[in-house]
Structures are given as structure tokens and as C-alpha cells.
Amino acid sequence: MTRELKEVQGIIFKRQKYKEADLLAKIITKEDGIITLVVRGALRPKSQLNAATLNFSYGRYVIYTNGRGLSNLRTYKEVKQYDGLYNDLTKNAYASFILDLIDHAFVEYQPLGKYYELAKFALERINENTDPEMITQIVQMQMLKAYGVEPELRHCLICGKETGIFDYSIKLGGVICSDHFATENSRLHLKPKETAVLRTIDLLPFERLGSIKLSSDTKKATRKAIDRIYRGTIDLNLKTKKFLDELKLFNPSNN
Ligand SMILES: [Zn+2]
């Protein structure tokens, strides 16, 4: 593929120093996937490219690319920033984890489709003060498919029942109804309400989930369950997740 100038729309995340005054910044885009950009001279004082590629900036960027490897940022148009994410340590930690989770599910330049919209939805909501823990759990559940894990949450894995009381089994890969609680010992022993939350945030389109409100006990339980599902099915060890967990430990009011 030849190199070409191309305009992409996306959100900047993950910056690191590159050569001399240059910087590498990742951008998440819808059609062109996740791209690592070389931002020349970004570390020089007064660099405009630097200001346009701070974490959680979004807008239209003109890049020079051949569709693989590093691409070069040439200029930008209409760039804004999710200030709330940049300035607040807790929101920043949640947003960084969400983008990291998406980053690891795709190879560079692989189109993201609805997962781009999911990222945008999550960042916008957290930026606007929606409970970041709830938004993150929604993203985690909906991202399982992108990792090739397709948990069955619509109906009981054993008898197919769609309504009733359910629990989750990591071994079976989904929910089972209360008819089998006595005989199926691989279940997580979640409360019915907790499994109902997992089903809801997995099955409903995320656009409809922005205002879901839970007690802190339920939220803690579902977070634990989601973490167990991830640990039990995907080999991921994200620093951003570790940091987020530590942050919660030191600041219990975030739970
Ligand atoms: Zn059943």
C-alpha cells in the first residue's frame, strides 16, 4: 500500500516519549482502528501538535499513513478535549482502563465498528459525571465478545429458560436457572439481583444503559463477578486495571 494523507476522526490515548523531541501517541478511530502516531517536535515548548495530542483529546487529525506500522501526524482540525477525564485522577484511571481494554482486544488498523462507539459513549458519560464504575462494568461486559468470549446471558445454558432466577457459571460460560442450583456446583453464587444486572448490561444496547443506578453493595458484587469472569477466561494483565484497583483500595468512597 502506498503512503497517503488521510483524515481520521478519533480519540487520543497513551502517549510516550519517542526520539528526541518526538512523541508516540495512540489514537482510537472507528474505520481505521487503533493507530500509533509519531508526533514530531511535540515535546518542544509551544508545540501545537503537543496540545492537540494530550490524552483524551478528540477531533479530526490529518495523518500520513500506509495502513500499517507507525503513521505520522501532520496536522489537526477541530480538536477538543474531555477535560473532566484529564483533570480528575479517578475518572482518568477509569477512562485509561477502558481504552486499554479496547486496545488489547484489537490489532492495529483493525476496524473497531461498534466498539469505537462504545469507547466514545463511555468517555463522554464519565466526562459528564455519570458513575464511572457502572460505565466501566458495562464496557467490560460488552467487551467480552471482542475477546472471543461469548458468554450466554440470554437463557439458561442447561434448559433454555429465559426468565426466572439465574446464577453465573464461568465453567459453563453463562447463566443457569435456579432449577439446577442444587446440582451445578461451578456457579458463582451471586444474588439473583446481581446476575440480573450482569444480564442487563450484557444484553441491552449500551446507549440505553447510561443511567443505570445500583446500590454500592450490588455494584461491588457485580464488579467482583466481572473480574472473576475476566480472570477465568482471558489472559490479560493490564497495569491500568491494577492501578484502578489500588485507587479504590485507598479511596473506598469510589466503590
Ligand atoms: Zn435452566
Image (cartoon, rainbow, N blue to C red):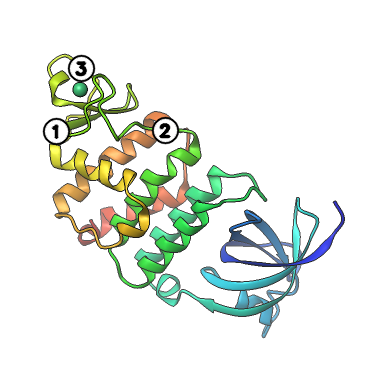
Q: Amino acid at mark 3?
A: Glu
Separation of residues labelled 1 and 2 (CA atoms):
21 Å
First in sequence: mark 1 vs mark 2: 2
Callout 1–callout 3 Cβ contact below 8 Å: no
Mark 2 falls on what kind of element? Answer: loop
First in sequence: mark 1 vs mark 3: 1
Relative to 140, say whether 11 is above or below. Answer: below
Q: Amino acid at mark 1?
A: Gly
Q: Which residue is the extreme one toward the right?
A: 2
Depth check, mark 1 against mark 2: the one in front is: 1
Depth check, mark 2 against mark 3: the one in front is: 2
Q: Which residue is mark 3?
A: 184
Q: Which residue is the extreme one toward the bottom?
A: 46
Which of 92 and 191 lies nearest the eye of the viewer?
191
Q: Which residue is the extreme one toward the top?
A: 183
Residue ID at (38%, 36%): 230
Mark 3 falls on what kind of element? Answer: loop
Residue 27 location (% of width, % of height): 61, 61
Q: Is mark 1 within 8 Å of ligand 1?
A: yes
Q: Which residue is mark 2?
A: 150
Residue 139 location (% of width, % of height): 39, 51
Residue ID at (55%, 50%): 103
Q: Quadrant of the C terminus?
A: bottom left
Q: From the viewer's perspective, is 155 left or right of 23?
A: left
Q: Amino acid at mark 2?
A: Glu
Q: Which residue is mark 1?
A: 164
Mark 1 falls on what kind of element? Answer: loop
Separation of residues labelled 2 and 3 (CA atoms):
20 Å
Instruction: Bin the neighbour count of mark 3 within 10 Å (Cα to Cα): few under 14, some 14-19, many 20 and up.
Output: few
Separation of residues labelled 1 and 3 (CA atoms):
16 Å
Residue ID at (62%, 54%): 34
